[in-house]
Each structure stands twice: as structure tokens, then as C-alpha cells.
Image (tube, rainbow, N blue to C red):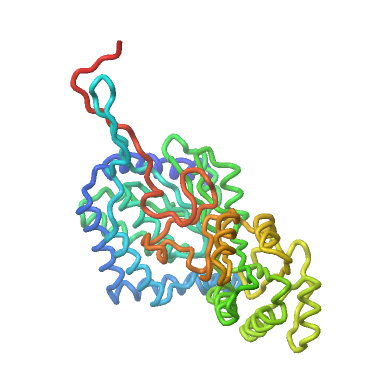
Amino acid sequence: MVESKLEKLVEEIAQRALNASYSLATLSTAKKNAVLERLAAELEDPKIREQLRVENERDLTAGETAGLSAALLDRLKLTPARMDSMVEGIRQVAALPDPVGQELERRQHATGFTLRKVRVPIGVIGIVYESRPNVTIDCAVLCLKSGNATILRGGREAFHSNQALAAIITRVLIAEGINPDAVQLIPTTDRYALSVLMKLDAYVHCLIPRGGEGLIRFVAENARMPVIKHYKGVCNVYIDPAADIDMAVSISVNAKCQRPSVCNAAENLVVHQDVLASHFIPIAKALHAEGVELRVDRLAADCLHQVGGIPFKTASEEDYHEEYLDKVIAVRTVDSLQAAIDFINAYGSGHSDAIVTADPQAAAAFQQGVDASSVYWNASTRFTDGFEFGLGAEIGISTDKLHARGPMGLTELTSYKFLIDGHGETRS
């Protein structure tokens, strides 16, 4: 597409989204929930599911031909279970309290008027994402319930799947008498469309990039509007001397292997040197049995040499910064709880980190000392997810510290404004 035509197309989409956002902000909770319930019912229809499967298969075939990695193909696939999860996520969001209109604060001014601080939608939110077509539904649903218009810019690898899902959303909006410009998918794979979108701060109030670190950094460095983001998920599991061995094995394997291709999977295993033989060896055996490659430091290597039978590689400095998104894990030994905290703060990405311990004081020190959006005690990092946190679907996970942090649900998609109720007061 000629760049001038593409610029006009994207700007028109943004203008329409802004206009739609004004009416969305005034919708009743009942009306928004009716839209979500109809969308959930549509996605349960066998005929619609078959249409989605066909379009998704087109994307998978093209992805295999293009040489996409197994991890990216996994993210791309719309399985029946993932469709069920989308439907459940929609209904979770419908069941959640509506944040719009919630009164956050009230005070009486000395002159007599009342000042109220009330939640309102942000306005127009642009979502830039790769691979996972379920993001189309997740983001649209959360934005609709929170009263925001959405502009979706999916990746080329999921283009047909995203178009099919966006068409279903449009059909539902029209059936419910809602402006269909409330949710729009940019209908091109041309990368220039993103460059145009990032300049439209007159219409778009916020951008949320979801994907690889390269995409997120590109958006953060070039967008004119605020960007909510996390660059990558280098998550850590620390095995404390007071850890239960069976729990340490179970959590370590789950955090790494339950779904290695996602941002809340563990990439580093941090082990106290006093429990290398007792705890690390059974963890290493269990990870090896799952096909995980171990990249270890000298102390862990010495321990593995003594036992034998578990292959490994020597970890480099870069390995501890790496988001593998695959069955690879780097192992670091430490001599104290504070050393573990220091390591995680230096090498982690501020996403999700866990301690396994029966010592509540160690757990409290870890949770207080680790600078991450989600810090776990005796639980897998894989739970950092809007669905698992009871937020319904999530629009992304933020490692920023302003406005939103961690999984972003409905309340994180609102701002606020002050409402002043007076009786003729004037300022002297």
C-alpha cells in the first residue's frame, strides 16, 4: 500500500476510535455486559469455531513455511482449549465490577462545594501485538468493559486469525447497537502502519505493545503517546535452604516447563550453595527428564560432575540476562538470601520472581527486597496472568512503576477526573 494511502487509512481509524470513545464512556454496565455475553456465545458456536480454525490454520501453515520457531507457532495456535479459555475470560470480565464511575475520594471544600475523584476510561488505547490471536479478544473485552475504544495492530503471522476474530466483534457490536468503531483492527500487515499509529497522539491516548523485546523497545522509543510495557520476562526461582525438596522440584519444573514460551516462565534457577546436593540435584534430574537444557555456574557444575548422568553447559554472563522462551534454564548458586535478592534485582526483568522456603522470615525479606511486579512465596511464577489473578483477561503485564504494574485488568485501564458539585460558590 502506498504510504500516503496508509497514513490516511490509519488516521481515519484513529479519528473514528476517538469519536466512538465518547459514547463508550457513557454506556451502562448492563449494556457493556450484554455485549460481552453475546460475544462469548458467538465464540461457543461450533460453526464460528470451525471458521476460526480454518483461518488459524492458514496462519499456522504460512508460519511453518516462513520458518517460525516452535515457540511462536505454539503462541499462534487457537486450540479448542484456548477458545474455551477465551470464552471463560470474557465471562469473568462480564462478572467483574465495572470500574467506571467508581468514587475514589470525596472531600468537602471550605466554601461548601463537594469534590469527588471518580474513575473514567482512558479513551483510545492502541494494542500492538505479535503471534497470539487470543489477544484480539482479551484486549477488546477489557477495553469495552472499561469504556475504552481499541485500535488493534496484530502481527502478520496471525493476520487471518485476527481478521476473523475482529469481524466477530464488529458483528456483535452492531447487533447490540454499539458504534463498531469501538474496536478496530488495522487491516494490513504493512509495518509502516505502526509508524503512523505511533504519531497519532491527537487521537490515541495510550499504546500497549505485547510481543518480543525488539517490538516493545521500538514502540517505547518512537511513540508520541504514553506506552505501558514490559521489555522481557526474565523470571527467577530461588531455592532457599529451608525449602521443602518436593515443593522445590514441583515449582521449579512447573515454572520452567508448564509453558516455556511465555513471559512468566522461569529463565533462572537460583540455588543456595548449602542445598546443591540435597535440592538442586533432584531439580536438575526432573528438569532433564522434561528435556530442559541446563546452563550452570562452577559450583553447580562441580555438583553435577559428582553425580553424573545429567548433561549441562557452562553458563555465560549473558545467559543470566536471556529470555529463552524455550526449554533452557540458567543456574546460579549463591551463599545467602541477600545474594539471591541482589542477583535477581541485577539480572531479572522485574516481572515475576519466586522463593521456595519454609522460613517465613526469609520469605518476607525476599518479597520485600525483590523489585518485581509479582513476587511469590512457595508458588510458581506461571500464575502471573490476569486470568489467574481473577482480573478476567489481561491486556498486558507492566513492569513500569507509574500508573500500572503487573497484570493489567479493568482498573488499570482507567484514569480519573474530579467532579465538583457546588451551590454557587465563587473564589474570593
112 left or right of 71? left
Task: Farthest residue to the bottom: give it.
Answer: 309
Q: Position of residue 99 (x, y in %)?
A: 31, 48
| Quadrant location, the C terminus | top left
Using the image as rendered, state which of residue 317 and residue 71 is in the foreground: 317
Q: Does residue 243 sit above or below 93 in this rendering?
A: below
Residue at 50%, 48% in the rendered image: 228
414 left or right of 353? left
Q: Position of residue 330 (x, y in %)?
A: 70, 70
Residue at 63%, 70% in the rendered image: 240
Task: Farthest residue to the top: give it.
Answer: 428
Does the image show residue 66?
yes
Residue at 63%, 86% in the rendered image: 289
Q: Does residue 265 sit above or below 249 in this rendering?
A: above
Using the image as rendered, state which of residue 335 and residue 267 is in the foreground: 335
Q: Position of residue 175 (x, y in %)?
A: 21, 57
User: Residue 16 lies in what quarter of the image?
Assistant: top left
Residue at 63%, 84% in the rendered image: 286
Does the image show residue 137?
no
Q: Position of residue 88 (x, y in %)?
A: 33, 69
378 left or right of 141? right
179 left or right of 369? left
